[in-house]
Image (cartoon, grey):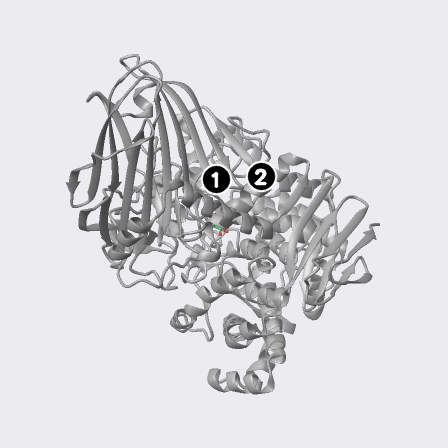
Amino acid sequence: MSPSNSHPSDDPWSIVFEGYDPEKEGRREALCALGNGYFVTRAAAPEATADEVHYPGTYRAGLYNRLVSQVNGEEVDDESIVNLPNWLSLTFRIDGGEWFSLDAVEILAYRQILQLRQGLLRREVQFRDRQGRETTLQEQRFVSMDRPHLAGLHIELTPENWSGNLEIRSAIDGRVTNNNVDRYAPFNKQHLEPVATGALPEGIWLTMRTCQSHIDIAMAARTRVAANGHEVNAAQIRDCDEAQVAERIQVQVERGATVAIEKIAALYTSRDPAIAQSTEAAQLAIQQAPNFAELLKAHQRAWERLWLRCDFDLDPVKYLEAARMHIFHVLQTVSPHTVDLDVGIPARGWHGEDYRGHIFWDETFVLAFLSCRFPAIVRSILLYRYRRLNEARQLARQHGYRGAMFPWRSASTGREETPRFQFNLLSGQWMPDNTFLQRHIGAIVAYTVWQYYITTNDQVFLSDWGAELLIEIARFFSSIATYNPKRDRYEILGVVGSDEYHTTYPEAETPGINNNTYTNLMAVWTLCRAREALGRLSPSRRAELCHVLELHQDEIDQWDVVSRKMYVSFHDDGILSQYEGFERLQAFDVEQFHEQHGKQRIEWVLKAEGDDINRYQIAKQADVAVLFFLLSEMELTALLKRLGYAFDQEQMQRTIAYHLQRTTHESSLSRLIYAGATATLDCDTSWQLFTQALFTDCSHRDGSGTETGIHLGAMAGTLHMLHHCYLGLCARDAILYLQPSFPAHLNRLRVNLNHQGNDLQIEITAKHLGITAAPDNRESVKIICQGQVANVQPGTSIGIHLD
Ligand code: BGC
């Protein structure tokens, strides 16, 4: 990995972070966060409370709460992922002195080691306090992948040059707020209300409740201390008030003799399945929990199982480490433990509070990697959308459309969560936020449904849920498209593309731009897929669904008409425009801007200067290029042909180059999308963008924002790139297609995956592709690689020479 203060160890599964830098602590807390798909805990130091440097955060997947705030003279309400009580809280003092804090001692040595294979975070600290006492601290922690409600912390303290009384304070601290993101400073932050605290025969517990969603959060913890190999039995409950509970343990320690402390914590909420009552469940879990070592063993076995499914090798190894780190964070955010939770994929993981834990379109990049490894997880994430179909129908109706209009940002109910204003930190002013007009989100829901279906051939899913989603989204696109007789074309007006810099025409009174190419073409794609999905249902299910949804042949015929007559905006020289009129905007000199303003956000600077980014040809992120990422060259050309537009490879190249030159990549998804879009057209550009995307979070780039959450879409997207662009892997019904564009910068890539119930290992080098089928596969797998057809029988391998 390339971070300046982290480096690979001799073990290719470990990432070592050297030193303690208060400035970078937030970023490390997010990068080393541990989770299991049910909850995630940031890697904050156990002795720390939230301050300028540290931010302890624990988030249960999809646990939101809504707060009302007064901003910009108005009452607004925002739903946020909730920072839960801090179960890690553990500190100590010597002879009744100051409680230990990293910031109050001289640090002699400091390193953290993230062990990806074991899902374990280690910390090694040597410090000298103000009295000259030197101590070594060795810490390990995990969030159990085996028992999703449990987590463990283990600390060993060795007095190097002193003997004395050591007092340990272990707490569950509910005095937490949501205070991770500077931009949200003007909003209310207090989501939790105390319910009760108490002591167990061994341990402590605390229950709190979210103030609007009324979800109970129950935590219990048990702390054991051993000195000289003997357990110390002198815990006293102290500092107990309505929002925190702590126990203190005193022990006499001798110079050179290590004291071991282990803390096991349990988290349950009143939304969890298979429990009667959350406080009772947390208490019971702690009373029954085995010790740290046993729990850790089972946790490691659970990770082993996950890594087996995701086994992956990449040469050179520096890319492998980054890719493994990405797999690690994907699985910490969504895992088999997520399946029963009714949650979507959060843009920033459950690793921080940026974007309030909302669900955007980033799932596209995540689900692709999971579909051929954990189809049950993907199905559950798609059901998050299905369960919010009625809300999306309601939203469509409110705006005068038919079908289902999914919101740009969603959380618990599926209502639109995009805030009405954004706070411009540079000017201190509020700016209207019109990004909610990204109606293209529906196409992504349709796209993920379809990709899952053709990858897994899950007919039950299509029949029971998928087809209905596709139909309702197609309905929406057909109804938002208006007929323009002058052009004899359908148009989609007043929307926003994925480039959020352009939300309106300069001087226009109402927000929205017209005929965003990405939106229009994905609308056409959706209309086609909805028709195809209907054709794939059994006649009886098709009839039943059409009856229930009151879908008649004339409406299906109308989809066909719209899908052949959608307007697409081209520049005079044949380049696909971002939207109608983009080419008439003024040129913008990005380099000059950066010289003057460094890495400041362009739209904020311009607004603060009384200007408006909508006037310029400059994009925040890939927009037209998303089409080239999602669709193959053949699919895209066929779509345009269907609409009567000729489009060749040379136009495609010029289109990408034109837009790439005008893109700032302020969104972490942008480089990734361009890397995919250029994979077959311009290998060098693609590779350069890919490696930049690969190190979005792992590199030390300032302003990446990792401290408030990892960039899950970019992380998973790089994995998707390796599979779908460089390996050229695409499952379509029963056939696995491979069309590699393998970069010269890679020596080898090997992946394990499951194709419709059959395990395969695929290995590629510059000249050779090998596929091995597991001996216990049910059937042979049909492969088409660069036009060559092969059947891989169970227990056999094939090799293909690459052109
Ligand atoms: C991007 C969106 C993205 C969101 C969450 C925004 O900055 O513009 O495309 O979905 O971040 O990652």
| Three-letter code for the amino acid on which mark 1 is drawn | Ile
Q: In this orientation, does residue 619 appear?
A: no
Q: Is residue 505 left or right of residue 106?
A: right
**What residue is rendered at 52% in x and 51% in y?**
499
The image position of residue 162, as x and y in percent, is 30, 15
Q: Estimate how packed mark 2 is, as few (under 14), some (14 to 19) or many (20 or more) residues with alpha carbons within 10 Å.
A: many
For mark 2, what is the residue? 322
Q: Quadrant of residue 455 in the image?
A: bottom right
**What residue is rendered at 30% in x and 44% in y?**
178
Judging depth in this view, the residue of 537 and 563 nearest the camera is 537
| Three-letter code for the amino acid on which mark 2 is drawn | Ala
State whether label 2 is within 8 Å of ligand 1.
no
**What residue is rendered at 40% in x and 24% in y?**
125
Judging depth in this view, the residue of 664 and 462 nearest the camera is 462
For mark 1, what is the residue? 602
Q: Quadrant of residue 61 in the image?
A: bottom left
The image position of residue 265, as x and y in percent, is 32, 45
Question: Comparing marks 2 and 1, which lies closer to the viewer?
Answer: 2
Going from N to C along the chain, the mark reached first, 2 or 1, is: 2
State whether label 1 is within 8 Å of ligand 1.
no
Q: Quadrant of residue 771 in the image?
A: bottom right
Judging depth in this view, the residue of 377 and 343 nearest the camera is 377
Q: In this orientation, does residue 528 appear?
A: yes
Q: Is residue 536 left or right of residue 215?
A: right
Q: Which mark is residue 465?
A: none
- Indicate the secondary structure of the residue bearing disc 1: helix
The image position of residue 71, as x and y in percent, is 27, 48
Q: Is residue 393 left or right of residue 623?
A: left
Give the answer, above or below, for where 709 lies relative to 64: above
The image position of residue 370, as x and y in percent, is 56, 56
